[in-house]
Amino acid sequence: MVLGKVGEKMRKKRVLLLSEGFGSGHTQAAYALANGLRELNPGIQTRVIELGKFLNPVIGPLIMNAYRKTVSKQPKLVGKLYHRQYKKSMNRFTQLALHRIFYTHTSQVISQLKPDLIVCTHPGPNAVVSRLKRLGLDVPLYTLITDYDAHGTWTSPEVNKYLVSTPLVRKKLMDRGIPASRIEVTGIPVHPDFWHTYDKSEIQAKLELMPLPTVLIMGGGWGIMYGDNLLEYMTRWRDRIQLIYCVGNNDKARERMLADPVFQHPNIKVLGFTKEISKLMDVSDLLITKPGGMTCTEGLSKGIPMLFYEPIPGQEEVNCEYFVENGFGEMLTSTETIDKWFAMIMEPYTSVQYRRTLLVKRNQQYNPMQCSRAVLQLMQ
């Protein structure tokens, strides 16, 4: 018995993080938290799993692809569905469907990995694990809400702790009857790369970038970009400003842009998927992005001013409202907005002072390490 207890104490703590690939932000948040936990405590073991893709590798990607097409071609439909279910927990039919598809396999995964803690960064896995807890699973469940809103599908009585982005999200959960003791304002986690600032000249040399005022334009993990007219309009500044377009996994968009003479210029870079976003933000003076929860939080961690375009109706609209109201960015509504901001970053003193102001605001509202630290403390 004594040896058994000693062995149990010596076993490394294990954290299982479950996500889904509906947009890249949910899984990015899971990996960010996993990396942050290991950075602060190398003795912790973490495992990130996208439940649908992992347990059903044929059907899972088909569902994700259908969702991706809906988001890009029918965003208003996505918004209607979001608002229709806003105050409701996941309905019983959906829970039953998830239960039938994932229950046995998820239970087996948990039995095999024996986690000390499960963190869900998407409502789907959250519902599956909640049902397992109702049927006897005795592992703490933390729910990390990866936006600046609190949709009803995130909520479940079986959740031991909610990790949320802001006091406003905390209040929204409390208004739904969730006790304050089960909610912790931690901010959305970002990868440890975003905890630090890198030397600008070194990055420019490494990534073969020009020492010019720089704008980083991101289309999210799926590379959903703004209308071609504004993308092309930005290139009018290419002799004075460096433009870095990141189109994620959208290979077709990248090929189309690279073949277009408008984007063929020494001061224009068109990138696909890259792990250098943290460094690209450090060398950039302005970020133009869709207001996904993860990208906005990464921009916040770097104190970079942001312009937001075409928010998907629903959570992205709420994300956008939060960052605009708190002075971290502005909606990109016209070519005049582009001209105003591009002219501003060409004034070195003004640009540097503005970024310093944003960093002061960030320090008042957000600590990039806070979520990882909070989870470690809660585990202890």
Image (cartoon, grey):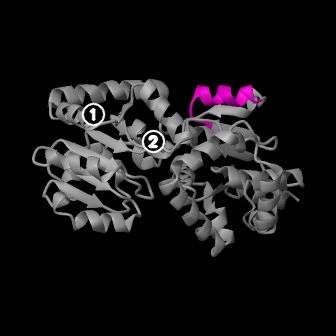
Compared with residue 107, is residue 313 higher up or lower down, i.e. above or below?
above
Residue 327 appears left or right of 268: right
Q: Earlier in the sequence, mark 1 or mark 2?
A: 2
The quadrant where residue 298 appears: top left
Q: Is residue 59 visible?
A: yes
Q: Secondary structure at mark 2?
A: loop
Secondary structure of the residue carrying numbered label 1 = helix
Q: Residues within 10 Å of mark 1 (few under 14, many from 20)?
A: few
Q: Main secondary structure of the magenta part?
A: helix
Residue nearer the viewer, 335 or 308: 335
Q: Amino acid at mark 2?
A: Pro
Query: Does the magenta-highlighted stretch encompass residue 175?
Result: yes
Please name the residue that numbered disc 2 is placed on.
291
The residue that label 1 is drawn on is 337
The quarter of the picture where the N terminus appears is: bottom right
Residue 13 at x, y percent in the picture: 68, 54
Q: Which residues are magenta?
A: 164-176
Residue 371: mark:
none
- Across and down, in percent, residue 206 comes to 22, 58
Please give left or right for residue 190 compared with residue 198 in the image.
right
Is residue 301 on the magenta stretch?
no
Q: Is residue 44 left or right of residue 134?
A: left
